[in-house]
Amino acid sequence: MMANAWLLLTAFVYLALLFGIAYRTDRFRESGKSWINNANVYSLSLAVYCTAWTFYGSVGLAASQGFMFLPIYLGPTLLALLWSGVLRKIIRIAKRYALTSLADFLSVRYGNATFLGGLVTFVAFVGILPYISLQIKAIGFGFELLVEAPDQLSTGSTSDSTTFFVTLVLVAFTILFGVRHLDATERHEGMVAAIAFESLIKLVAFLACGVFVVYGVYNGFADLFQKASAFPELAQLWTLGHDGEYEEWFFLNLLAMLAILLLPRQFQVAVVENVNERHVDRASWLFPLYLLLINIFVLPIALAGRLEFPDGQIDADTFMLTLPVHLENGWIAWLVFLGGLSAATSMIVVESVALSNMICNSLVMPILIRIPFVNLKEGKGLNRVLLFIRRASVALVLFTSYAYFQTVSSAYSLVSIGLISFLAVAQFAPALLGGLYWRNGNRTGALLGLSTGFAVWAYTLPFGQMIQAGWFEASLLTEGPGGIDWLRPIALFGFEGAKPIVQATFWSLLLNTLAYVGGSLLTTPSRLERQQARLFVGAMSFSEHSNSLQTWQGTATPIQLQRLLERFLGKDHTRQALARYATSHHTSFADLLAADVAEAGLIQHTEKLLSGSIGSVSARIMVASVVEEEPLGMDAVMDLLDATQQAIAYGQQLEEKSKELQKVTDDLQSANLRLQELDRLKDDFISTITHELRTPLTSIRAFSEILHDTPGLPEEKQREFLGIIIKESERLTRLIGQILDFEKLESGKMDWNPQPLELQALCEDALASLGQLLRDQQIRVETHFPETAVQVEGDYDRLLQVLLNLLSNAVKFCPKQAGRIEVSVKRLEEHAEIRVKDNGIGIPEKERNAVFEKFRQVQSTNEGKPAGTGLGLSISKNIVEHHGGTIGVAPGSEYGAIFFFTIPLLPETPALPNLQGGYVPEDPDR
Amino acid sequence: MSQKILIVEDDPAIVVSLEFLMGQHGYDVRVAQNGEDGENLAREFRPDLILLDVNLPLKSGFEICQQLRSEPDFDRTYILLLTAKGREVDIEKGTALGADAYVTKPFSTRELIPQVQRLLTEPRSPS
């Protein structure tokens, strides 16, 4: 029908056109503008989702299973409602960290997990192979169908030479198209523009074919459906509810929802190639609209195919081509061929570019960078090495896909092959979604989940297919490995009766999720992981345009950065990139390089440029090799923030400690002041004590000398002087006793001898022992005692000492010849109170507490001499308090001091007559 | 006419000893037992030498010393401070206030008597 050469020429011209679009876009971009900075172009580029599977396979599926083709498009449509949430979050994170692939994304999320990135790459690579092989198959049969009569092509199988040739061309095309040179930012505007154009062609071709079939061959939808409804097996195609269809419907929807996010090419166009986050908003309705349009004619074309080829010898996957060929419309057939070619090539190009990027950045580079003799840090011309790795990756991907096609997928329908890939990439879902929304998701969980899911996938689907393809014994499917029934790949764990894809989806995603969650909960992530988790989960709180990368605190010269870039990007690209940077920062290229120290922004920019070529993790290592010092930027800040929660608790503890410390300090300070005060008082005390000791000593010495040096002293004088010596000696003894008492009280070594005693008697004893002094000073004494005995328990000698101290103080301050002292005993509720009142100079109110402090003397410099040692009242206070009483100066002491002290009463105070009157103390110390 | 000595001291035992000693050595002795009495008696008695205790009731020896030294009437009166406080600061304070000698308790009569006699061999010349 159509000449092979003509078809080939058309195909090549078409490919050349695409290349031209890409080329022009790139040139245009170099002039600083962008064709693809446009929500419509972004939406169309997303339609790379519609591959040969959609273009040919949907019809094929609809021809046998009716609406079952729809979930693949319903899923993304439903998900579109969530897009502005999930996708925008992913885009924002990816832009912040200059992430260039899903592998990059996950490895950075889980704390620069290089191994995880490698695993993701491996899973993506293996998982996508069937999908690419599907495209090769579609292009292949496109060629063959148009060359030979459709009637002779009953199976849609193609010859080896054609597909191999197709593969070769695709490798060359993809390399030219997507890996022509290293793009510093890993964005391919030219490619995206071409993809968008191809999406248009796909849609136009599909709609043209549909219109041709429905309106050209039949008289519209009604006519077509009416004719089809005549056949029961066709009529049931547009009804739902056959066995297991609902669950299949559900799982396919789920798979498609995940695939639209997780397929490497979708991640590439939706995230990496995204120019503006806001484009997502329009895409969230425009892309579903595209899906709706491209699906309108699926069922009609399928029905028409079934009607036109009733014998079922034509592979339904080829209806799109075989119908126009059969109906002899060459233009439509040609258009469909171009549409199919568009669908397949766009998928292959983007998928290969995405995969080669992952293979290079997440698989090869992390290995190379760790091999010492490769010495990436010093090597020259690395850009060529990188380019070679990528191109080789493209070839590897395509040839492996070809091999897969040859060995396995040629026997399967397009859709069943595609779904295998869908499920493979769906294994990334727990790690990605968990990584976006669950802080506790960690590396161990991600690795466990992904490995588990991948293993189940590999076992249930590709392995199952390989068995069916005859690679392994068929008994593995029917009886299970080693006869273990529940291990059969098509009915794992006894999941019987469902299609392989349904049970594989169920088990792989279930076990994957469980392993991810379990692994995350059971292990503790590193600090870096926790930090990344927080950054990723909380990504939307960062500004859309906020600085993407961690800041570098170290220093590097611009020349060092330039050399680093040149190694990976080559001289020209480095120069261009830096010149562009200089322009955008209002400086010149020369000035930029002339700086002694590169500004932080330039270091960041360098890292970003490198991220595009070698992946973010490797880029960071390379930049770190040039920039001196450890980075203390976002990382460190976030580390700090990470520690914040602990720090807050810790801070509270610190605050408490600090308060305690402050209190201790205050205490110490006041203690110190107190010590200083005490020190001063002690000095005074020693001065006073020595004064008090020196006075009797002076008399003793003087009289001793007089007695010694004065011969013939009358005996009367001798006796008088000796008497004074004795009295003064007693005074000395008393003083020393008081000092010792005080020391005993202070150190708690005082021996107490408690006994019941009567206070009236105590007072009388005290007055009796002072009788001579009182008479000498002509002091009048009054006593006010209750009639009944007031009984307390106490140490007689000590309490007498207190009383004597108070009385002798009173005597000291009484005016000469007109002194008056009142002593009274009174019962209070639980205590007895003894008062000693004099008519002396009194005590100023502010001194009333101070007089009881040790070493403190009532200051009365102008009025009279100090009250003795300064120990008497302090000793008294100690004694009274030991008895459970209080001592003080009563109000009204301005005119004559009133001292009082209390002693607890004995529980019962029997009203006994005064039994102890006239008790004379043995201790004559006072 | 015998030279006159005023003793201002509140401790009765010391007063007795000083009074006996000074009287035995032929001085005309008067005694005051507090600061105010001492100052008044000094004006009335016009002693040649005052044995002045520092720690006195009502008025301290330092104050009396300062007061008397400001009056020309006492230019020729020796003042000998007696104190139980033997610290250097006290001695300095006493001499600064115009005391002629400073005796620390417990003093020896064997030193005190010669010291008094030495001072009284010639009239005091005002400084």
Image (cartoon, grey):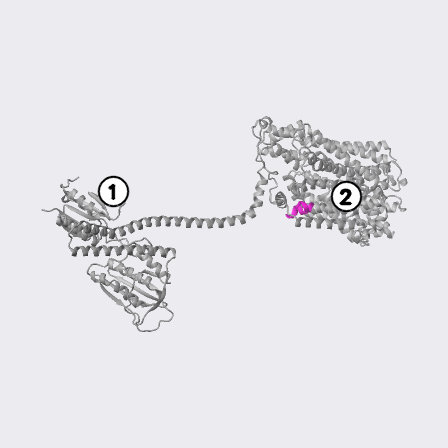
Question: Is residue A179 among what the camera can see?
Answer: no
Please name the residue that numbered disc 1 is placed on: B92
The magenta segment is A433-446
Q: Alpha-carbon distance for marks 1 and 2? A: 109 Å
Q: Tell me the SS state at disc 1.
A: helix
Please name the residue that numbered disc 2 is placed on: A421
Chain letter of the residue carrying label 2: A
In percent of the image, x 40 and y 48: which residue is there? A669
Amino acid identity at mark 1: Glu
For this orientation, the residue located farthest to the front is A712
Chain letter of the residue carrying label 1: B
Name the image quarter holding the C terminus of chain B: top left
Residue A779 locus on image (x, y percent): 22, 62
Q: Is residue A437 magenta?
A: yes
Amino acid identity at mark 2: Ser
Main SS of the magenta part reads helix
State which mark lies toward you, 1 or 2: 1
Question: Is residue B79 among what the camera can see?
Answer: yes
Q: Give whichever of A283, A848 is nearer the camera.
A: A848
Instruction: Determine the image quadrant of residue A914.
Output: bottom left
Residue A280 locus on image (x, y percent): 67, 43
